[in-house]
Amino acid sequence: MRNVNKKNIKGVDTSFGREFPDIDIAYSETPEEVWKRISGKIEHKEEIKLTSNKRWMPLYRWAASILLLIGTTWGVLSYTKTVEVDPSGTVLVDLPDGSTVLAKNSSKVRFRPYGWYLQRKVSFSGEGFFRVKKGSRFVVESPMGSTEVLGTSFNVLAYKETFEVACYTGKVKVVTKDHEEVVVLHPKDSMTKLGDDKVALRKQNTELSAQPSWMEQKFSFHRRSIYYIITRLELEYNVKIEVPKDLGFRSTLIFNRPKTIYNALNLVCKPLGLSFVEEKKGFFVLTKP
């Protein structure tokens, strides 16, 4: 350590220097040598890290490509097509395998066109007539249950608290919501489930003709409750109808489909001794005399 001339420094407490003697510290490396050694280590570490990244980069690219391919494929297969039928129309929906759905007014049909051959499944609400090509399992899912077939023709009514399936050809398995009941239908068989009631099975139902009556522009009710009949009118004309809760009778009615809900209600109410009033547009109330 170099000596300092304390006499030339004014105002400095020179006792500090007397308490600590001068010490000469020997350095094995100059500052330039230390810096060179440290910077060499840093450069070496960076070089190793860079070499490591380069080695794994092809694997990262491969993994990213696989993930992108999986995501794109799943996006295509899960794409869902939705067909909503106007309140006054009927639409024939062609499915990818040649099966068809003739959907009535206010019905909704949903299916996956690109994932169809992995799973033949249709989500359906409303009323429609299905013609199914033979092949793998075919499922129609509705709010109150599902219908499973292999190759057949059948009619599904899924509206509000009403779930009804009628088999015309082949064989149909119907599973109600939460798998509470399972029913197998053969040609001319039908089943109906209203709300929480048990399934009503009708074997060799004489009400069934070669095709549903609605496809012939007719209403055909054989010993049906007034609540069931009104449900069909609501769906057909896209209206709401309030019915008294104490009407427990059944009726048989067959008539051509009127153009208006007013004429349809007249044909239903008069034979049963009922009347109706339209409280507001599209909302009717049935009354007893």
Image: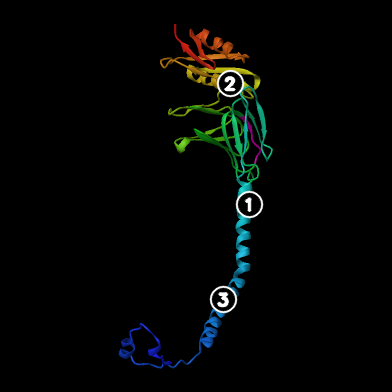
* Callouts 3 and 1 close, C-beta under 8 Å: no
Residue 10 coordinates in the image, percent (x, y): 38, 84
Q: Is residue 274 magenta?
A: no
Quadrant holding the C terminus: top left
Marks 1 and 2, how far apart at CA: 41 Å
Which region is colored magenta? 129-134
Dot 2 lies on which element?
helix
Q: Is residue 133 magenta?
A: yes
Who is closer to the viewer here, 255 or 17?
17
Mark 3 Cα-neighbour bin, 10 Å: few <14, some 14–19, many ≥20: few
Dot 1 lies on which element?
helix
Residue 211 is tagged as none
Q: Is residue 283 visible?
A: yes
Three-letter amino acid code of the residue under disc 1: Thr
Mark 1 Cα-neighbour bin, 10 Å: few <14, some 14–19, many ≥20: few
Q: Which residue is mark 3?
A: 46
Q: Which residue is mark 1?
A: 72
Quadrant holding the N terminus: bottom left
Marks 3 and 2, how far apart at CA: 76 Å
Callout in the foreground (3, 1): 3
Residue 76 coordinates in the image, percent (x, y): 64, 47
Q: Which residue is mark 2?
A: 236
Q: Residue at x 64, y 23 (%)?
A: 215
Colour mode of the rendering:
rainbow
Mark 2 Cα-neighbour bin, 10 Å: few <14, some 14–19, many ≥20: many
Q: Is residue 225 visible?
A: no
Q: Earlier in the sequence, mark 1 or mark 2?
A: 1
Q: Residue at x 63, y 55 (%)?
A: 69
Q: Quadrant of residue 120?
A: top right
Q: Is residue 54 above or below residue 173?
A: below
